[in-house]
Amino acid sequence: MKIHELKRDLSDGKLDVTLEKIYGSSAAAVQRERYLAAVDSFMGLYPNRENIDIFSSPGRTEIGGNHTDHQHGCVLAAAINLDVIAVVAFHDEKVIRVKSKGHDMDVIELGSLGVQGEEYGTSAAIIRGIAAKFTEMGANIGGFDAYTTSDVLSGSGLSSSAAFETLLGTIIDERYNGPKAGAVEIAKIGQYAENIYFGKKSGLMDQMASSVGGLVFIDFNNTENPMIKRLDCDFERLGYSLCITDTKGSHADLIDDYSSIPFEMSRIAAYFGETHLRTVDEKDFLAELPELRGKVSDRAILRAAHFFNDNKNAVEETAALENDNIDKFLELVGQSGNSSYKLLQNIYSCKRPQEQGLALGIWASERVLNGRGAVRVHGGGFAGTIQAFVPRELESEYRTEMDRIFGAGSCKALRIRSYGGIKITADKDGE
């Protein structure tokens, strides 16, 4: 669409129905201004581009299954109403330019899509990896210029990286691949880029939740064809607010902490001749505890024990929500959080034991909740965010206390978003 036509449609409210479906009935005005500002920023960067499209991809919240996905386990996750958006102009210059708000521009030549070691840990690596995978799949990729802006803050534990990966995958698939990849394949492409090009050995949960959208139970027993079940659950209807608090911990230099979890779990699996814990019998694991000690670290044993606990928890949490049994669900969330704290041990980094914002946030949450609701570490852990299910009558008090400790705006009440990565159009029908 012509830039000025799109700006007129936004200003005239012609996209408001679409924005309300994506962000909620009261959010259209705020999002309208956000989109207009993004278009203006794009015009300043790329003044010669006349035709643009807008894409959106959500962050995600992990609800059940903490560090189970990379062991082919089960998770419960949801897309959320915080996202990254991109204003995009396509062209035939065989180069991708992406300028994200607050960051330098990345320029990726499509004739050079091999792994670049010096790019590990950068957004350029993600862009290059996704373009490379689509090319390998047979897509005839052309170039594009993009400006992105995100309210999924980096390091917030809401997976801004997966949102960015899904966004790029959706852009390329929409324009240059049919679109025929679909949400599941786009998630796999994002994981590929993160694992191989970015250098982080993550599981597939983050990308899958962002790409598929909604509240989903995912069984990764077959990673090529994961079983996905969408759930119809409204936490507000059940009397609870889903709150995420950023404890302001730094994620710098934590890749080794994250990577140690799948590595140590895989050491246990290898003892039993397997590549992942999902195919290890828990009874065999328990029987072999004396022999395991000395062959692997005690921490690896505890982390494997966490996997067996939380893999079952994700299944049981899903069943509780399907039966509207919120009390059972909250009990299981508490058990999951306790397992992460004691067994998985991803509450703080051993490199910086003095920094324990997650533990502080959990303790402070428990004081306010006073036996109601539930609180746990959120996402990868070690620093970043905690998740709490807060009785709605306590939401104001809870958010006030979290903001008092960690700073204004640290605590957000989230809503589940029905859509994964999408192109924004005026005729979005909600299907």
Image (cartoon, rainbow, N blue to C red):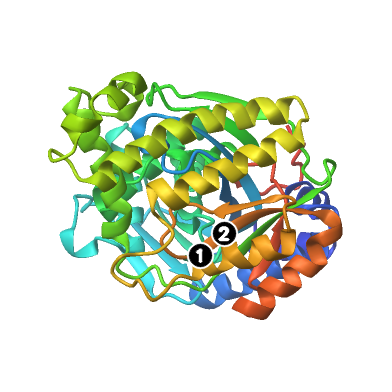
Instruction: From the image, tell me which residue sits under label 2.
Output: 386
Mark found first going from the N terminus, 2 or 1: 1
Numbered-mark total:
2
Residue 60: where, in percent of width, then height? 57, 49
Amino acid type shown at disc 2: Ile
Label 2 close to label 1 by CB (< 8 Å): yes
Task: Give the spatial CA distance, label 2 vs label 1.
Answer: 6 Å
Question: Is residue 173 shown above or below 124?
Answer: above
Residue 245 at x, y percent in the picture: 61, 65
Assign the N terminus to one quadrant of the image.
bottom right
Question: Where in the figure is residue 124, as x and y percent of width and height?
Answer: 32, 61
Q: Which sits in the foreground, 89 or 115?
A: 115
Residue 65, given in percent of the width and then of the height, sits at 50, 38
Quarter where residue 225 is shown: top left
Camera sees residue 195: yes
Q: Label 2 crowding class (10 Å Cα cut-off): few <14, some 14-19, many 20+? A: many
Q: Quadrant of residue 329?
A: top right
Instruction: Name the mark on residue 358.
Output: 1
Q: In this view, does 50 lie to the left or right of 346?
A: right
